[in-house]
Amino acid sequence: MAAETKTTCPYCGVGCGVIATVDEAGAVSVKGDPEHPSNFGRLCSKGSALAETIDLDGRLLYPEIEGERSGWDEALDLVARRFSETIAEHGPDSVAFYVSGQLLTEDYYIANKLMKGFIGSGNIDTNSRLCMSSSVAGHRRAFGADTVPGTYEDIELADLVVLTGSNLAWCHPVIYQRLAAAKTARPNMRIVVIDPRRTMTCDIADLHLAIRPDSDVALFMGLLAHLATSPAVDQNYIAAHTEGFGDAFATAAALDINDLLERTGLPAMQIREFFRLFETTEKVVTCYSQGVNQSSSGTDKVNAILNCHLATGRVGRPGMGPFSLTGQPNAMGGREVGGLANMLAAHMAIESADDRDRVQRFWSSPVIAAKPGLKAVDMFRAVADGRIKALWVMATNPVVSMPDADNVESAIAACPFVVVSDILKDTDTTRHAHVLLPSLGWGEKNGTVTNSERRISRQRPFLHVPGDARADWWQLAEVARRMGFGAAFDFDAPAAIFAEHAALSAFENNGSRDFDIGARAGISARAYDELSPFQWPQPAGTAAGITRFFAEGGFFHADGKARFIAVKPPSTDRTSTEFPFTLNTGRIRDQWHTMTRTGKSARLSAHIAEPFAEIHPRDAIETGISSAGLVEIESPHGRAIVRALVTDRQARGGIFAPMHWNDQFAAKARIDAVVAPITDPLSGQPASKNVAVAVRPLRAAHYGFAVSAAKPATPDAAYWAVAKAAGGWRLELAFTEAVEDWIAWCRRVFAIPPEIEPLGYADRQSGDLRLAFFDGEVLLAALFLAREPVAVARNWAISQLAAAHGDLRKRFALVAGRPGAGRADPGATVCSCFSVGVNQIAAAVRGGCHSVEAVGKETSAGTNCGSCRSEIGRIIDRCLAAAAE
């Protein structure tokens, strides 16, 4: 009989409930949990494909020391000894933990407790520093605590939703679907998107403000100045619940309209319309994410937004308030336990002597960190210059995700002692570890996560533990025990850790701190196992329920009042004659972070299979970059090579490139190697959205595309990008110099046995070459080469890996690179859930399907997770426009 387990998705901060089913044969399937209040059964494309990412291919299954398998005792003894010796010789600040929003709260809690309360250093930071720390800093300045006031329901109840720095359709797809459904139900709802790019999210926008990079502060300063002289200003709320309005208004009013227009690059008419909508609509929610946070002025951007909501009293009431959309599944949980270098556990302040004393007494710890530790960028600088001599990296891949990534890699490679806990053996970071520790992955982990609306949910195990993998909290507790701190880390299960975490949140609280889940203190193992999703706060003696903050004041500064922050517009243009373009990095729909999980899914890789850069058509012409050609992106810090996507969705002078690709999937596509280590002075968050770069075409002698049943070996090519495909692998290639013997090259890269001869042809005049290798009726590999980007029906060619080729005509059709008569090419994948291509959607439109719903009924595209509905709509528009010409 099949067994069902309710758990939580491990991707973005939406925190969707998932039901995982394991049948009698051990096969796993997933579906959305209709009872979970975050998603009500919806899942995005990534969540829908979770069952395709849990195989053991590439897993790290046993501890390793210097590349050799070891036992746990040997590995943990070594970690404890080296950390203890380093601390004894160089002090507690000579060691550091770099952790992750992929950790569960229980893992995070133990890591923070060990570093701050027993080692006595603040040197624990997290990759959440890269995505949400500006929100933390802005919340703390304005509210006195890192408090998200509202709930997801507010987004649906609002009459105006402002999305700034958020490609909601691709980065938080389930929230986007909830918003789209609300707008369909209430067509008078208005949506404003503020983003330099015209993203898929803009398809449901009533107004798109294509601002210049980093001009958000100026825009919201202008809005505050407008609101302050309008009927929308709530003088009673300001007087009763805030301080600093006068200074904030005076600073905002000093920005004249001409300066505002110049800084934002927006037409006056659009600015007036945005201001009018915000002024005249009471129920306003402003959602912001990485486009706001990942900036050298990120904290000021957050406070500029909060100022506008405080000025109108639109905080904490149904359908209104500022809303920070979290990037990772447990970035919020990490903030709750003090996983950032400048925070203590339970939202207490490391700079407060009273808070330090409180936490130390609760832990009965020998020491407590007396000052903030090093934030991520500074932490790796300290690794580079030798101040940090022992580093433990957990559940993250900083060689790919950190700015100035090449120097980060050099720093880690030179560090005297590096420990990495991960689920995969080979990543860009694990290759530099002295000790590798195998961790549990999704489906094996047991603990809790907190989503963007402060909702705590369980991740439950439903898979057998592979090899000798162990929970991250267990690894940390065992090292703590070996360092002499055993009594404080004597946990036998995550339920006990969560119970202590909850008890600390309530310790000497009395309503003085926002984070309080004292109702769960002392939770039993059974109650923990059965724990339903709930929102904090939930103090002892209270029941679970939807909770909003600040509608009637009650802020967490000492006087109970919020603070307006007087912000000033920063200088935003970093370009120069040498580096004239502005690079903006981000995520795409079907991949996650550095692809260690999503890269396993052929379905997810089908949508966008290689790294790319969006560039405006006129910029492409002026730089000599051709559509589908290759482009080099360079800054003073590094370079990357990616595919050119020429599109007017990208503003002139700007480049967009995703951050996912790494050395396991592409030749030189770690885009964060290009990003400068510039940070916000308060939050320490890197400025990943405004990077001065140069772009130029990469001239190739040959371009190639290949399919292979076996995973290809790393090819010797100027450019390559490999992706999982149905039945095998796909490979994009470019060569700056011709290969002397292509058959020998194929044998080496695709592991073709010497007795198998290829079928193919070569055209010396055109430079075209086709080679296909068959073992009986089975296609082993095929290579297509040309002097221009190869025009091959890619999805059709991939499908041939699973086809029988006993018919010689089918073999020749493959060599030709296109289906024979009567066989259709589906085209590039649009709907990952049902593998529906652009040609199939276009055919449905020509057949009379002129709406997204009609296309879905005909092809199934867009009927599962809905993440592709915006793209389907654009295809319909293009087809109808072409038919009308």
Image (cartoon, rainbow, N blue to C red):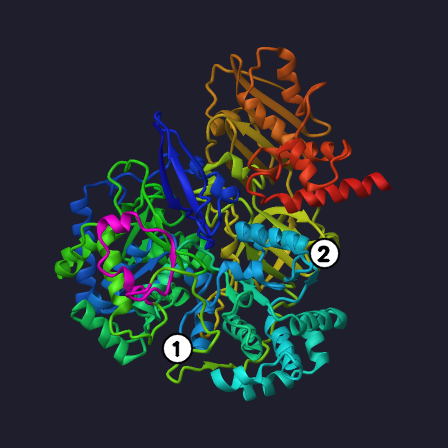
Task: Kindly state the secondary structure of the residue where label 1 is placed.
Answer: loop
Give me the residue at 42% from left, 53% from top: 329
Circles 2 and 1, Cβ within 8 Å, touching? The answer is no
Q: How many labels does the image show?
A: 2
Look at the image and tell me in which quarter the N terminus lies. top left
Residue 475 in the image: state x and y as whole percent.
23, 51
- Say whether disc 2 or disc 1 marks the residue closer to the N-terminus: 1
How many other residues sit within 10 Å of disc 1, few (<14), some (14-19) or many (≥20)?
A: many
Q: Is 574 drawn above or below residue 221 in the view shown? A: above
> Which residue lies under the disc numbered 1?
556
User: Which region of the structure is painted magenta?
Assistant: 516-542
- Numbered mark located on residue 619 in the image: 2
Nearest the viewer among 519 and 766 is 519
How many other residues sit within 10 Å of disc 2, few (<14), some (14-19) or many (≥20)?
A: some
Confirm whether the magenta stretch covers residue 723: no
Name the amino acid type tagged 2.
Asp
Task: Kindly state the secondary structure of the residue where label 2 is placed.
Answer: helix
- Numbered mark located on residue 96 in the image: none
Going by the image, does 329 lie left or right of 788? left
What predominant SS class does the magenta segment belong to?
loop
Nearest the viewer among 603 and 92 is 603
Residue 469 in the image: state x and y as whole percent.
26, 41
Q: Is 484 drawn above or below residue 717 in the view shown? A: below
